[in-house]
């Protein structure tokens, strides 16, 4: 695609500036500069520099803590790394902080990978505890190497005045730099939130298994967020070191500082772009003004102020300021001049599924899955052939879903293999859920796993991103899938507000959006009324007609009998019968294990 001419880019930029959400946001942000310039007080300038620094730190933390949902309570380790690296490079090598801050950011990125890669596998509070441990280790190292870092006595930044050394007599210059860093951090945060990575991070935060089934590498997504967040945090640490001109480990690697920046995001609204800024603007001026007015008698008062505001917000506004008031404010802003609807985008073409009907597309070979002394699957071998609908039936607890989990990478078999044939017909043995998804194996879950805080169309987009990198293309593809499954009328409804029938269709829609060649359906008709069941039967047939091969676990015998070309029966972890549906249901072992004589009599078999 040819690059847009300069006139076209200028027109697009002016149209962007004309959006009321943009010009109102820029007007509000400009107050951080206008107010201190108009008041012309060194103390007020100090307050606004502090606001910009902590709003930037909180915004950077929000990328990993809000978007990705990883509670990092040791995040100030990157702030300290940036501060000490910049100061030491000035002291020992006379390197300008404008370059030293990028060295600190690079070191912070490396450290974020060293922390994140092993720790992102931890669950619950253990990740938060691990980040605190890393913060404490680095703090102790800074104290121990006193000959290099100054130890607990601290380190004085060489006082070289001027823009080249980022040290000024006039405090307003600090505000310009702090404001610029804040703007850049907000821009990065906004760009991430509205990109594929932002959607991926929210999906990982909401439901990691569903994210993996959509082809997302959870660890890779979280590592990207951690690296970006660490770099931004480090840049603010470097700047703040120049502003304070004195560093000591207790301040630079402060646990209370880490908790504070997380708290600002929580007060303003976790996982939102504006939330950390609003939380900081609400809390920091109160604490700083109280300390300025009361002097030494207010020592530690900021902690009390933070605590009171946090308690009030969490009790009355659990979604934070943006989560509670954001939709109403946005609706009012959208009424201002300049708001334009996005043009309709042409729906991208479906991925072509190549291959000959009847050839193997997936095989399980002697799958054995043991949980301690329990054998959940016992030498299960199934061949799925292109273009068919294969039904899997059996009593509850027979091991059907365990087979599905092995066929999609969510469980690694104790022995045996799962082979997927790629587009060229080559056998591949993937090991992770996202690898299965990228090979064209899509699956739903027995218990639906929607991304509850995302809308229906955004849920489907999570799947569409696997084949479409841009947000616009993914949305267009998601609209096509929503129309196919009958969810277009609720596309802007949050998934957590849907009834069970729509949730089941949404689960199928998100999987279909990955454009799979193989679709694993795990009891998608369970809990539905007759009308919804009939809609699902028709949908599965329509999916098969597009060239997708289907394997379905189902307890609704009328539905699975009418749909399936072949049926596999599993009981106690073993395949006891497979073949033509009418032949299988007359099998004596199947009747005794699952169907019963009444079903056979009722069907006239």
Image (tube, rainbow, N blue to C red):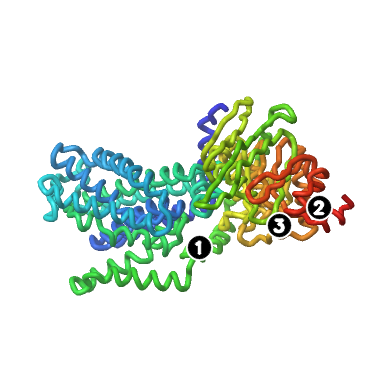
- Is residue 597 found left or right of 214 in the rendered image? right
Q: Residues within 10 Å of mark 1 (few under 14, many from 20)?
A: some
Residue 495 position, x and y percent, is 62, 57
Q: Which residue bears the numbered disc 3?
A: 526
In percent of the image, x 58 and y 57: which residue is there? 452
What distance separates the C-alpha of mark 3 from that of mark 1?
A: 34 Å
Residue 25 against residue 362 in the figure, above or below? below
The residue under label 1 is 323
Tags 3 and 1 in contact by the CB under 8 Å rule?
Answer: no
Sooner in the amino-acid sequence: mark 2 or mark 3 = 3
Q: Which mark lies nearer to you, 3 or 1?
A: 3
Q: Nearer the viewer, mark 1 or mark 2?
A: 2
Q: Position of residue 281 (x, y in %)?
A: 37, 62
Q: Earlier in the sequence, mark 3 or mark 1?
A: 1
Identify residue for label 2. Answer: 558
In the foreground, 382 or 196: 382
Using the image as rendered, state which of residue 349 and residue 501 is in the foreground: 501
Q: Which structural element holds mark 3?
A: loop
Which residue is at 25% across, 62% downward? 41
Question: Label 1 vs label 2: CA separation?
Answer: 46 Å
Q: CA distance from mark 2 to mark 3?
A: 13 Å
Q: Quadrant of residue 165?
A: top left
Residue 337 position, x and y percent, is 58, 54
Residue at x-position 71% and y-position 33%: 386
Residue 342 in view of the camera: no
């Amino acid at each position: 695609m040819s690059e847009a001419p300069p006139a076209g880019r200028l027109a697009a930029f002016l149209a962007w500036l004309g959006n009321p959400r943009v010009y109102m946001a820029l007007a509000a942000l400009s107050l951080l500069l206008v107010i201190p310039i108009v008041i012309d007080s060194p103390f007020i300038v100090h307050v606004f520099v502090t606001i910009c620094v902590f709003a930037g730190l909180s915004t950077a933390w929000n990328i990993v803590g809000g978007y990705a949902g990883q509670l990092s309570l040791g995040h100030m380790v990157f702030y300290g790394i940036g501060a000490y690296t910049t100061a030491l490079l000035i002291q020992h090598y006379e390197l300008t902080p404008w370059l030293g801050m990028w060295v600190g950011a690079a070191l912070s990125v490396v450290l974020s990978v060293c922390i994140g890669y092993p720790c992102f596998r931890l669950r619950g509070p253990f990740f938060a505890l691990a980040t605190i441990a890393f913060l404490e280790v680095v703090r102790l190292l800074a104290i121990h190497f006193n000959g290099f870092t100054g130890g607990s006595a601290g380190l004085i930044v060489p006082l070289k005045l001027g823009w080249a050394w980022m040290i000024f007599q006039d405090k307003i210059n600090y505000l310009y730099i702090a404001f610029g860093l804040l703007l850049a951090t907000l821009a990065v945060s906004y760009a991430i939130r509205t990109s594929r990575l932002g959607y991926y991070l929210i999906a990982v935060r909401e439901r990691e298994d569903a994210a993996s089934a959509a082809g997302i590498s959870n660890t890779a997504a979280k590592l990207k967020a951690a690296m970006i967040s660490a770099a931004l945090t480090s840049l603010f640490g470097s700047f703040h070191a120049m502003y304070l001109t004195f560093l000591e480990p207790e301040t630079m690697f402060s646990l209370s500082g880490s908790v504070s920046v997380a708290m600002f995001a929580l007060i303003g609204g976790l996982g939102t772009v504006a939330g950390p800024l609003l939380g900081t603007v609400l809390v920091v001026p109160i604490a700083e003004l109280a300390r300025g007015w009361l002097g030494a008698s207010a020592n530690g008062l900021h902690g009390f102020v933070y605590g009171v505001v946090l308690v009030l917000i969490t009790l009355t506004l659990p979604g934070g300021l943006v989560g509670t008031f954001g939709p109403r404010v946005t609706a009012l802003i959208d009424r201002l001049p300049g708001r334009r609807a996005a043009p309709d985008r042409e729906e991208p073409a479906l991925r072509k599924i190549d291959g000959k009907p009847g050839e193997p597309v997936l095989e399980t070979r002697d799958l054995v899955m043991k949980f301690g002394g329990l054998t959940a699957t016992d030498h299960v071998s199934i061949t799925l052939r292109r273009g068919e609908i294969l039904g899997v039936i059996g009593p509850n607890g027979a091991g059907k879903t365990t087979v599905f989990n092995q066929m999609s990478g969510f469980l690694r078999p104790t022995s045996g293999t799962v082979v997927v044939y790629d587009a060229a017909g080559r056998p591949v043995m993937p090991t992770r859920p996202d690898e299965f998804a990228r090979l064209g194996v899509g699956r739903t879950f027995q218990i639906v796993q929607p991304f509850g805080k995302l809308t229906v169309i955004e849920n489907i987009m999570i799947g569409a991103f696997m084949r479409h990198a841009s947000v616009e293309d993914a949305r267009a593809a998601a609209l096509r899938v929503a129309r196919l499954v009958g969810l277009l009328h609720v596309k802007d409804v949050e998934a957590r507000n849907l009834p069970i029938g729509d949730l089941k269709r949404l689960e199928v829609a998100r999987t279909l959006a990955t454009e799979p060649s193989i679709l694993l359906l795990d009891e998608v008709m369970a809990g539905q009324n007759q009308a919804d069941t009939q809609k699902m039967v028709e949908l599965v047939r329509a999916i098969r007609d597009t060239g997708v091969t289907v394997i379905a676990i189902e307890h609704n015998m009328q539905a699975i009998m009418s749909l399936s070309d072949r049926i596999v029966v599993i009981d106690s972890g073993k395949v006891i019968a497979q073949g033509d549906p009418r032949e299988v249901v007359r099998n004596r072992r199947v009747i005794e294990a699952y169907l019963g004589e009444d079903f056979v009599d009722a069907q006239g078999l």
